[in-house]
Image (spheres, rainbow, N blue to C red):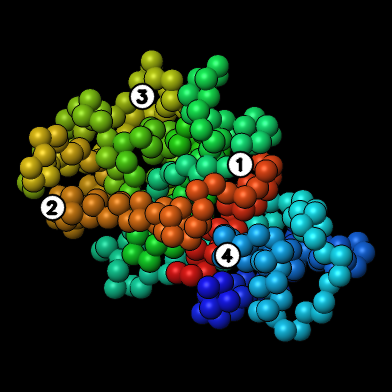
Amino acid sequence: MLISRLERLGLGVLTRSCPPELVDRVVGEARCSEKRRRLLSARFTVYFVLAMCLFPQADYLEVLRLVKTGDKGLRSWPGVNKSSLTRARQRLGWPVMRELFRSVARPLGTDSELFHGLRVLALDGMLLAVPDSARNNDAFGKSGSHRSPMGYPQARVVAVAECSSHAVLDAAIGGFKDSERIVSDTLDAHAGPGTLLLADRGLWGLARWHRLRAQGTHLLWRIERRKARRVQDVLPDGSYLARIEANKHSKAAGTAKAPPVLVRVIEYRVDGQPDVVRLITSLTDHEKYPAEELAILYARRWEIELVFDEIKTHQRGRPVLRSQTPDGVRQEIYAHLIVHHATR
């Protein structure tokens, strides 16, 4: 089964997305190039880690065999074993994979999929179970209480994805108890003029809103009903302009010092549901961006949930990641994101 999958996808999908010259440049910028010639070079280790994610069910030596099967030019390597492959991963580190991901991640949607000229992106997070080692537990944490932890440690991945193509454009990694809102503050790639970012109410933050708007990003976010109650003007399509001020008692980082903001509020009910869905947006022109169109568009936020399902269920192929150390976990996660982008 693994050979047939290699023949169908193989290293070609990885080398097309991550050509050797790009890998060498990223490795060089990260100062991970070898000072002496090694059998397991940094470049080869990058492709090994990517292949490890392409074939999640295979062990290290099987992955090595598959990599050699995909490249007939590689010579036989006596003495290479799991320990030497582990050491090669440790030498490479995880920032190389992060920078490689950032180098290859780009929008893949067509102009016909834009919304009034705006590229539609979604922001959300997912949890990935990692091996239950002491170092992983210290770095990422588990659910449950300190006295009664439950299950595996979990890494929190917050990502921005293009809704039309499912391409992940940026991602940050935190621990189980890290807030998605705080982790998301490091995501700046591909946000800016010409983009519309969708997000759920758990990611609301006034300072976060100002930061993204300052970059030129337009926003369409769900929000709690108690927010944006200071109505300034009612618009002909039923939406209205409202003012949001910082909550002085809020514990969310940065919101207490953020200045007020004027937003457009859209409220509606989904058929058969009693709860009112409440959206706020920076698109205040009701004629160019009718409320009904924005309400329909917001449903596309669920595309990022499909992206996470593609990575967690279909691509990963195993309930728990491989890596026993936090650096290895971060390296493996960014490698999975690279493989997902390559297959898009």
Q: Is residue 197 left or right of residue 48?
A: left
Q: Nearer the viewer, mark 2 or mark 4?
A: 4
- At label 1, counting other C-alpha atoms closer than 10 Å, the crowd grade (few under 14, some 14-19, many 20 or more) is many
Residue at the far right: name it: 36
Residue flagged by tag 3: what amino acid is it?
Answer: Ala
| Residue in the image at 30% along x and 52% along y | 302
Q: Which mark is residue 131?
A: 1
- Classify mark 4: helix, strand or loop: loop
When the figure is inspected, residue 244 is found, relative to residue 210, above or below; the finding is above
Q: Amino acid at mark 4?
A: Phe
> What residue is shown at x 57% (from left), y 49% (from top)?
321
Instruction: Look at the numbered disc 1 and give the secondary structure of its residue.
Output: loop
Asked if residue 256 lies left or right of residue 332, the reply is left
Which badge, 4 or 3, comes first in the chain's sequence?
4
The residues tagged by marks 4 and 3 sit, at their Cα atoms, a distance apart of 48 Å
Q: Which residue is mark 4?
A: 55
- Residue corresponding to mark 3: 246
- Residue 81 pos. (x, y %): 80, 60
Q: Which residue is mark 2?
A: 292
N-terminal-most mark, 2 or 4: 4
- Disc 2/disc 3 C-alpha distance (Å): 28 Å
Quadrant into which the C terminus falls: bottom left
Q: Are marks 1 and 2 in contact (CB under 8 Å)?
A: no
Which element carries disc 2, helix, strand or loop? helix
Amino acid carrying mark 1 in the image: Pro
The image shows residue 293 at horizontal and vertical percentages of 16, 56
Q: Are marks 1 and 4 in contact (CB under 8 Å)?
A: no
SS at badge 3: loop
